[in-house]
Amino acid sequence: MKLTSLALPLLAFVASVAAQASHIGLPKAGSIVHKGKKVKVQVVKPNSIEGSIEVGLVLSFQYCPPPDPCPNPTFDLGNVLYVGKLNAKFHEIPGEPYQNFTITIPDYSFWNPGPAQIIENRFHLIGGGPAAVLETNTVAVQLKN
């Protein structure tokens, strides 16, 4: 009986966090990005009946020198390219709220063409408590000159 009474609120909290989860809509995985060029990054925040309070958003770019895998983005953000808040809005119906950002890929001469990732870190508060949530999302891209 006690396990059930503890598990239900925890399950409800996990479900509400998942419903609030954002993701990177653009660029798509595998897209080519060029050093020194602008890229549109779209952060999608699914609509939810439970509101959230946006605290902060960080967009960054991380070069992944072969043959090593990309570093863990929770420990290494790479080059921070945007710091601010997410203000996702509906743009078409049907659809999910999103916000577009334009970032410029760094132009370091020592970066050879190869794998990289765009990283989104979003900090927000949900629920009546509220509870603090930090999300990290990535999209793998290919860096070209």
Image: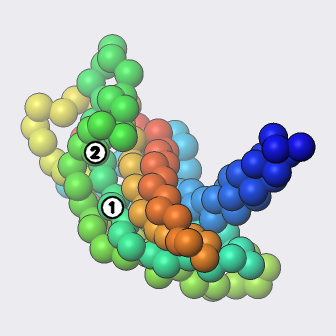
For numbered disc 2, what is the local secondary structure? Answer: loop
Q: Are the residues flagged by discs 1 and 2 in contact, CB closer than 8 Å?
A: yes
Image quadrant in which you'd find residue 39:
bottom left
Amino acid type, callout 1: Val
> Which image quadrant: the C terminus?
top left
Residue 57, picture quadrant: bottom left
Q: Which mark is residue 120?
A: none
Looking at this view, name the residue that lies furthest to the left. 109
From the viewer's perspective, is residue 87 above or below residue 122?
A: below
Query: Which residue is at the front of the view, 63 or 31?
Result: 63
Within-10-Å neighbours for mark 1: few <14, some 14–19, many 20+: some
Q: Residue furthest top?
A: 67
Answer with mark 1 or mark 2, whichever residue precedes in sequence. 1
Residue 7: x and y in percent read 78, 46
Q: Nearer the viewer, residue 3 or 14?
A: 3
Disc 2 crowd rating (10 Å Cα; few below 14, some 14-19, many 20+) is many
User: What residue lies at 39% left-to-right and 48% top-to-bottom?
Assistant: 118
Q: What distance separates the C-alpha of mark 1 from that of mark 2? A: 9 Å
Residue 69 quadrant? top left
Q: Left or right? Give the position of 93 relative to 127.
A: right
The structure residue drawn at horizontal position 44% and vertical position 41%, both measured from the top left corner, is 141
SS category of the residue bearing label 1? strand
Which residue lies at the image location 22% right of the left edge and 29% below the top edge? 112
Q: Please identify the quadrant where the N terminus is shown.
A: top right
Given the image, on which type of amino acid does mark 2 rest? Leu
Residue holding disc 2? 77
Most extreme residue toward the right is 1
Residue tagged 1 = 58
Is residue 73 rendered to the left or right of residue 53? left
**Is residue 114 in sight in this rendering?**
no
Residue 133 visible in image: yes
**Position of residue 5 measured from the top left corner of the image (x, y, whole percent):** 82, 51
